[in-house]
Amino acid sequence: MSNIRISGLTVEYGIEGQPRHLALEDVSFEVCSGEFFCVVGASGCGKSTLVSAIAGFVPPKAGRVEVDGEAIRGPGPDRGVVFQEYALLPWRTVIDNVALGLKFRGVGRDERRRQAAEYLKLTGLEQAAEKYPHELSGGMKQRTAVARTLVMSPKVMLMDEPFAAVDAQTRVVLQQELLRICAAQKMTVLFVTHSVEEAVFLGDRVMVLGRPPHQIKDMIAIDIPREERDWGTIATDPRFAVLSGEVMNRVRGN
Amino acid sequence: MSWSAQTKMLKGASGIAAILLLWQLSVYVVDVPPHFYPSPAAVWRAFIEMTEKGILPSYIADSMLRYLLGVLIGTAIGCALALLIASSKLAMRMLGPMIDFLYYMVELAWIPLFVIWFGFGLPTILVAVVYVVIWPVLFNSLSGIRSIQPSLILAARSLGGSRWQVLREVVLPGMLPQAVNGFRVAAGFAFRALIFGELIGAQSGIGYLIFESTTHLQTDRTVLGMICMGLLWLFIDRNYLRPFEKATIDRWGMVVSHDS
């Protein structure tokens, strides 16, 4: 069953007085329910625009975005968005940041703090509940942002290079944690990255995106079971090396 | 009170006493008519007289009321305009240059026109004070809104925040540190506008006292007015503005310096 269906999606960006920039042209693909779907490509290929379009931040010039069979109209909590720059409210504590969407939904203070606390536990942030974002490391900030979207029980989670700003050691830990959490929540994920290794490590499928026209360069299934996705062992796994090489080739345009 | 604070106050008080003494002595030395160079004793007598007649207290009350009303109304209008303008790109482009210009137009220049439009008294003073408060508040609030990370607003919208909820949870707190900066500047401008306004456009108040007494050569009252003006500003600054500034820095300072 497909969860996200993109058909003929075309998105243009324009700054007044400049020729309009075609970010996405006639892009079509589907993401299955519960799938971890990675989009990889060089910078400027329109992969962030893809997230913005599915999130409902930018209206498409043509084409449709459907989530669970419904065409999207503007942003909404059914699609959780995780940004590279965390986008946490600096004046709110971790738990209040996580509870923000529940507050918007009209959930009472005690109930939303109770629910937020559950997701803090899931993301390993119990100790940080009453801290402010500036007191956190990059990794903890991104855990907070993930908890903030999960607490809304979204149909899909859209992640735009979420780990690009954290250090390498933390990134490895976060990637494994993310897989664990998404499996536990049976979450559908569309994950955008410029890192081939990250895409192959995380994804059930990897879509290689290039510049228009014919943007979808390839769609590669990563047939390594989720249980075997562990940085301790996967680095020496020949399947991982082969698939990474294949994706890398497609990104380079061969 | 601690010993060092006591000696500090004692030193300060003796400094003021020395100035008063020198001033009184200089009156004997220069030997000019009292209306030309009033002595501290004459100013003191004017203070007693005007207080007993109830003129001074009512003037001070008038000035304070105008100041307070003007600052409150001006701040409210400035913030509201900032939010309105920021919510529309067109308004931002159309009004941006004008705001910059009006911000630099000295408030004094408007007062004669305000007198024609609104007559002598409260409306003119109020308009003058409101006018000078609006621009720094608007200017700073706008730059506060512009400094909010776009992804914060996108994140709030994708979490289901309505326009109003995003305004309350993201835009208002995000602009607050800069709006407070603008308010502090405005509070100083407002006091000057009050005194200038009263010099020209009022029939009561501290500014009026300074202006009116000079035309009658009651310079002891003029000096009294000047002293009251200084004390009033000292009072406002120490009791309200500085604690307010400190409170906002304590609460929001970290927000400004650490981008997260």
Image (cartoon, grey):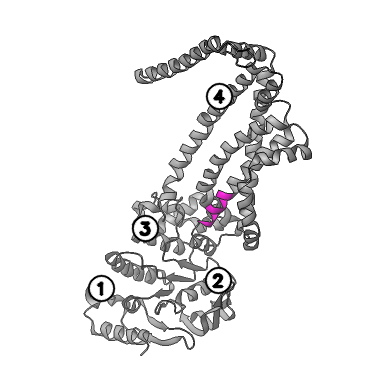
Describe the element under mark 1 as helix, strand or loop.
Answer: helix
Q: Identify the residue under disc 1.
A: A231
Q: Position of residue A13 (x, y in %)?
A: 55, 75
Q: To which chain does the residue with label 4 belong?
A: B
Q: Are marks 1 and 3 on the same chain?
A: yes
- The circle on residue B137 is none
Q: Position of residue A208 (x, y in %)?
A: 40, 83
Q: Residue shown at 53%/51% (left/top)?
A: B175
Q: Mark 3 belongs to which amino acid?
A: Lys
Cα separation between marks 4 and 3: 57 Å
User: Given contact means CB atoms under 8 Å apart, are the residues at marks 3 and 2 in contact?
Assistant: no
Q: Nearer the viewer, residue B46 or A15?
A: B46
Describe the element under mark 3 as helix, strand or loop.
Answer: helix
Magenta highlight range:
B139-147
User: Given contact means CB atoms under 8 Å apart, are the residues at marks 4 and 3 in contact?
Assistant: no
Q: Identify the residue under disc 3.
A: A121
Cα separation between marks 2 and 1: 34 Å
Cα separation between marks 1 and 3: 23 Å
Q: Mark 2 belongs to which amino acid?
A: Gly
Q: To which chain does the residue with label 1 belong?
A: A
Q: Identify the residue under disc 4.
A: B231
Q: Identify the residue under disc 2.
A: A56
Q: Is residue B242 left or right of residue A17?
A: left
The image shows residue A11, relative to residue B43, as above or below, that is below
Q: Residue shown at 43%/51% (left/top)?
A: A93
Q: Is residue B111 visible?
A: yes
User: Given contact means CB atoms under 8 Å apart, are the residues at marks 2 and 4 in contact?
Assistant: no
Cα separation between marks 1 and 4: 71 Å
Mark closest to the chain's N terminus, 3 or 2: 2
Mark 3 residue crowding within 10 angstroms, few (<14) / some (14–19) / many (20+): few
Q: Position of residue A252 (x, y in %)?
A: 35, 85
